[in-house]
Image (spheres, rainbow, N blue to C red):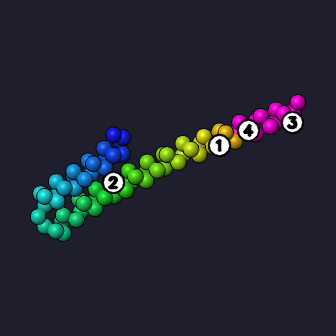
């Protein structure tokens, strides 16, 4: 199990516990909203991390290609 799945499971468990322990519906929405924001932040951060690694690899590949083309031109 990866860290994102563990975090999302933890958010769900905390949401269920807060739902069961808080009886006032107006107050109940506050911790659920906060947990929802944390879950969205975790998912967005995961996507950002995954795409930035790919972008770095693509940038490195294009730099290597440009360097090799420059070496061929200089020869």
- Determine the CA span between mark 1 and mark 2: 31 Å
Q: Are the residues flagged by discs 1 and 2 in contact, CB closer than 8 Å? A: no
Residue bounds of the magenta highlight: 63-75
Name the outermost residue toward the top. Answer: 75
Quick check: 63 above or below 17?
Answer: above
Dominant secondary structure, magenta = helix
Q: Earlier in the sequence, mark 2 or mark 3?
A: 2
Per the image, the residue denoted by label 2 is: 38
Q: Quadrant of the C terminus?
A: top right
Q: Are the residues flagged by discs 2 and 4 in contact, CB closer than 8 Å? A: no
Q: Is residue 30 left or right of residue 4?
A: left
**Residue 66 lies in the magenta stretch:** yes
Q: Secondary structure at mark 4?
A: helix
Res 23 → quadrant: bottom left
Q: Which mark is residue 65?
A: 4
**Residue 50 lies in the magenta stretch:** no
Q: Earlier in the sequence, mark 3 or mark 4?
A: 4
- Determine the CA span between mark 1 and mark 3: 21 Å
Per the image, the residue denoted by label 1 is: 59
Q: Earlier in the sequence, mark 2 or mark 4?
A: 2
Quick one: label 2, few (<14), some, or many (20+) residues within 10 Å?
A: some
- Determine the CA span between mark 2 and mark 3: 52 Å
Q: Is residue 28 left or right of residue 59?
A: left
Q: Secondary structure at mark 2?
A: helix
Q: Are the residues flagged by discs 1 and 4 in contact, CB closer than 8 Å? A: no
Q: Quadrant of the N terminus?
A: top left
Per the image, the residue denoted by label 3 is: 73
Quick one: label 1, few (<14), some, or many (20+) residues within 10 Å?
A: few
Quick check: 74 above or below 37?
Answer: above
Q: Is residue 67 left or right of residue 3?
A: right
- Determine the CA span between mark 1 and mark 4: 10 Å
Quick one: label 3, few (<14), some, or many (20+) residues within 10 Å?
A: few
């Amino acid at each position: 199990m990866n860290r994102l799945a563990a975090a999302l499971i933890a958010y769900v468990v905390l949401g269920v516990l807060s739902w069961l322990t808080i009886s006032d519906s107006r107050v109940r929405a506050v911790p659920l909203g906060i947990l929802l924001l944390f879950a969205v932040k975790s998912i967005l951060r995961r996507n950002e991390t995954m795409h930035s690694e790919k972008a770095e690899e693509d940038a490195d590949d294009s730099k290597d290609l440009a360097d090799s083309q420059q070496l061929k031109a200089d020869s």
